DNA sequence: TCTGGGGTCCTAGGACCC
DNA sequence: TCTGGGGTCCTAGGACCC
């Protein structure tokens, strides 16, 4: 049995945690750059605001209904996500963190969980709420896909009180009948219309479709989803997913950037940040990929391009990575366009401890390791941005920063932002 | 005026080998 | 007019997820 534990309206719940006055009030959280709506409290969902809606189109409606709007505050969400995971691990040995707000729990290793999974999950849910203040819903099923489907029902049907177990075999059909094909985990907005045209309109229909036929008309992915709906595990529990294969840092700019100098600063910043993540994973990058683009919307002239460079020996050294990124930029930058977004991706990642050498060249920089350790240590100890490459520009003069008009304090990760609890006037402290 | 960011996996087609 | 058979590896593009 798999359980899928999913935090309710996660980012909105995080924002409410330190603002009890927002309980039962509409709360929306925006993507980076205050671009789109990416989290909605139930009140905002009830207004009919879709996931991913551009904020500028909803702004009027939000003002009218008094929706409390937040820019995304990832330090806060990541910290609370870790607390939720820790709470889960305190009760369940096998936890697979699937995303910032979801985790699969494997029920069969723990005898008390296997005996009555649904009752056990009730305890899990209570503990997470009690320890972190974040409400979660839990769906149970024989496969991850069925647990996902069960989770939907747990969320949608208030009478389930946040827990639903998908029954086995044919008994599941009456529930799967109520799930639109487009809402099945693994069926996206491209294949859903195609499946519908072929008469497969619900989760139940996909479950009973002929496997060979699905495989022919689609790919192995859709065939697996169909098998999973039949209770056959195709996506096994994987507690420790391997190291990442790509690391990507990209941002849209608050205002379009036209100057090469500003772009160099931004690219340096992205490359610096990617290199930091890379070392955190203990990996080294074999290639670097840089891309930039103008806005895909509106009538302004458009330009988009990308460049890739390969390192002779995989590296995790910031100066190597920033240097190559800037060389890539020289290759594709064209004067005169209003650039709206750019980014850096590190690929061909290898284990940093066991690097393949270069056949014809001896490349040894013994100081490199300790220099990067010092940089990471300083930035860890004294805060991000304590040391950085000069090419990133001076912090307060960067023109390419993103818009974040409604950001909440970093309540749990920054000393200056810690909430203070003041005693009432004249009260005696014990 | 204003439209996010970060991932994984699969497939088809091309290039190459003997 | 006629031109083999059996492989591997790489890449770009497309699909999906949150």
Image: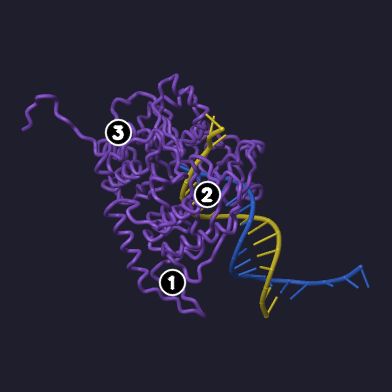
Chain colours: A purple, B yellow, C blue
Q: Which mark is residue A18?
A: none
Nearest the viewer among A75 and A232 is: A75
**How many other residues sit within 10 Å of disc 3, few (<14), some (14-19) or many (≥20)?**
some
Label 3 chain ID: A
Q: Label 1 belongs to which residue?
A: A355
Residue ID at (50%, 42%): A185
Question: Are dots 1 and 2 in contact, CB under 8 Å?
Answer: no
Q: Earlier in the sequence, mark 1 or mark 2?
A: 2
Query: Helix, strand, or loop for circle 1?
Result: loop
Looking at the image, is B13 positioned above or below residue A368? above
The residue indicated by pointer 3 is A17
Which label's residue is closer to the chain start, 1 or 3? 3
**Residue A306 versus residue A202 in the image, above or below:** below
Q: Which mark is residue A342?
A: 2
Spot the residue most to the top.
Answer: A64
Mark 1 or 2: the one toward you: 2
Mark 1 to mark 3 CA distance (whole Å): 45 Å
């Amino acid at each position: 049995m798999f359980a899928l534990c999913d935090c309710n309206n996660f980012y909105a719940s995080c924002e409410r945690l330190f603002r009890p006055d927002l309980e039962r009030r509409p709360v929306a959280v925006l993507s980076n750059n205050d671009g789109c709506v990416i989290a909605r409290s139930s009140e905002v969902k009830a207004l009919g605001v879709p996931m991913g809606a551009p904020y500028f189109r909803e702004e009027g409606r939000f003002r009218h209904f008094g929706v409390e709007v937040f820019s995304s505050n990832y330090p806060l969400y990541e910290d609370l996500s870790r607390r939720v995971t820790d709470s889960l691990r305190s009760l369940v040995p096998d936890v697979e963190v699937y995303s910032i707000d979801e985790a699969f729990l494997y029920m069969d290793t723990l005898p008390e969980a296997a005996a009555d999974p649904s009752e056990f999950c009730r305890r899990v849910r209570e503990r997470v709420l009690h320890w972190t203040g974040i409400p979660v819903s839990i769906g149970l099923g024989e496969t991850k896909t069925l647990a996902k489907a069960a989770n939907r029902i747990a969320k949608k049907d208030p009478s389930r009180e946040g827990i639903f177990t998908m029954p086995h075999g044919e008994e599941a059909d009456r529930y799967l009948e109520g799930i639109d094909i487009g809402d099945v985990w693994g069926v996206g907005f491209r294949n859903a219309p195609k499946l519908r045209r072929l008469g497969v309109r619900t989760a139940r229909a996909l479950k009973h479709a002929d496997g060979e036929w699905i495989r022919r008309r689609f790919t192995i992915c859709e065939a697996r989803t169909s098998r999973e709906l039949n209770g056959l595990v195709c996506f096994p529990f994987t507690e420790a997913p391997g190291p990442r294969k790509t690391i990507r840092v990209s941002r849209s700019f608050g205002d379009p950037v036209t100057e090469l100098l500003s772009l160099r600063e931004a690219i340096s910043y992205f490359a610096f940040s990617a290199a930091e993540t890379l070392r955190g994973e203990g990996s080294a990058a074999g290639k670097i990929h840089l891309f930039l683009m103008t806005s895909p919307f509106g009538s302004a002239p458009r330009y988009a391009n990308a460049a890739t460079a390969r390192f002779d020996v995989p590296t995790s050294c910031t100066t190597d990575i920033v240097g190559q990124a800037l060389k890539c930029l020289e290759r594709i930058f064209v004067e005169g366009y209003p650039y709206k977004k750019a980014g850096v991706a590190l690929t061909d990642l290898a284990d940093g401890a066991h690097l393949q050498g270069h056949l014809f060249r001896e490349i040894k920089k013994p100081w490199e390791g300790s220099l990067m350790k010092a940089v990471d240590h300083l930035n860890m100890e004294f805060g991000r941005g304590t040391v950085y490459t000069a090419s990133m520009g001076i912090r307060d003069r960067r023109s390419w920063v993103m818009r974040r008009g409604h950001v909440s304090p970093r309540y749990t990760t920054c000393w200056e932002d810690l909430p203070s609890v003041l005693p009432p006037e004249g009260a005696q402290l014990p």
